[in-house]
Amino acid sequence: MSDPAAPLYRPTILAGPSGVGKGTVVAALRRRRPEVWLSISVTTRTPRPGERDGVHYHFVTDAQFDDLVATDGLLEWAEYGHHRYGTPAAAVRAQAAAGVPVLLELDLAGVRQARDRLAGAQTVLLAPPSREELRRRLAHRGTETPAAMATRLAIAEAELAAADEFDRVIVNDRVERAVEELVDFMGLCA
Ligand code: 5GP
């Protein structure tokens, strides 16, 4: 049941290219605003050491995933390397209806699938200060082969080219400033 006295937050869908600092911004947001509820995805892959069901993912069987797709239980889903991943619709809608500020972290394809299926949803793209800076941040990670980095950069270009599709673009020039803008965009009181 939704509480009529609860403030209404628009569920927020956040995207941003790899290397832009999405993980850092989301972690900082949650430290500052622990009431923000992050959607937990379902996946058909098996847990890695240290991963817990219901914390990192909801780990499901192929049959359970098929069932979720067949019953329209996912806001969006995708396949990565033989495994499927998706955003469960019911939990997101229930939290939003209960007045909880909801945040979904998705890639561009996920944003395109989910935005019209989630009532009142608003979208935000986290962007680097410049393409050169993104290149530098990706290179700094030192975990990418040149080919992998070229792929990530190409995906990043495509995501940034879609900026017009988003309700807001937040430039991650400084983490604290970007978080402040996100807090404001989500309608969370200062
Ligand atoms: P991993 O197996 O490393 O945890 O995740 C593999 C990929 O699945 C990552 O690119 C991650 O962003 C993506 N992923 C995780 N959850 C979801 C989801 O709910 N929907 C979609 N479309 N992709 C997801």
Image (tube, helix red, strand yellow):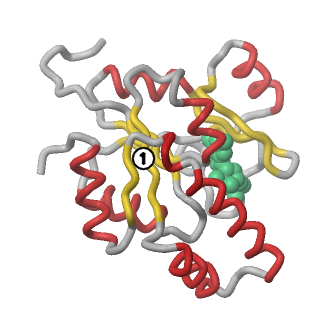
In the rendered image, residue 68, in percent from the top left (x then y), is placed at 70, 21
Q: Residue at x 75, y 28 (%)?
A: 65
Q: Where is 154 relative to 144, above or below? A: above
How many numbered circles does the render carry?
1
> Does residue 12 appear to the left or right of 149 in the view shown?
left
In the rendered image, residue 95, in percent from the top left (x then y), is placed at 37, 28
Amino acid type at circle 1 is Val
Q: Which residue is drawn at 32% across and 74% down?
A: 174
Q: Is residue 58 visible?
A: no
The picture quadrant where one finds residue 112 is: top right
Within 10 Å of disc 1 (Cα), the crowding (few <14, some 14-19, many 20+) is many
Q: From this viewpoint, which residue is outermost toward the right?
A: 82
In the rendered image, residue 46, in percent from the top left (x then y), is placed at 77, 49
Q: Where is 112 relative to 52, above or below? A: above
Q: Where is 29 relative to 138, above or below? A: above
Q: Residue at x 48, y 74 (%)?
A: 130
In the rendered image, residue 43, in percent from the top left (x then y), is placed at 70, 41
Q: Quadrant of the N terminus?
A: top left
The picture quadrant where one finds residue 93 is: top left
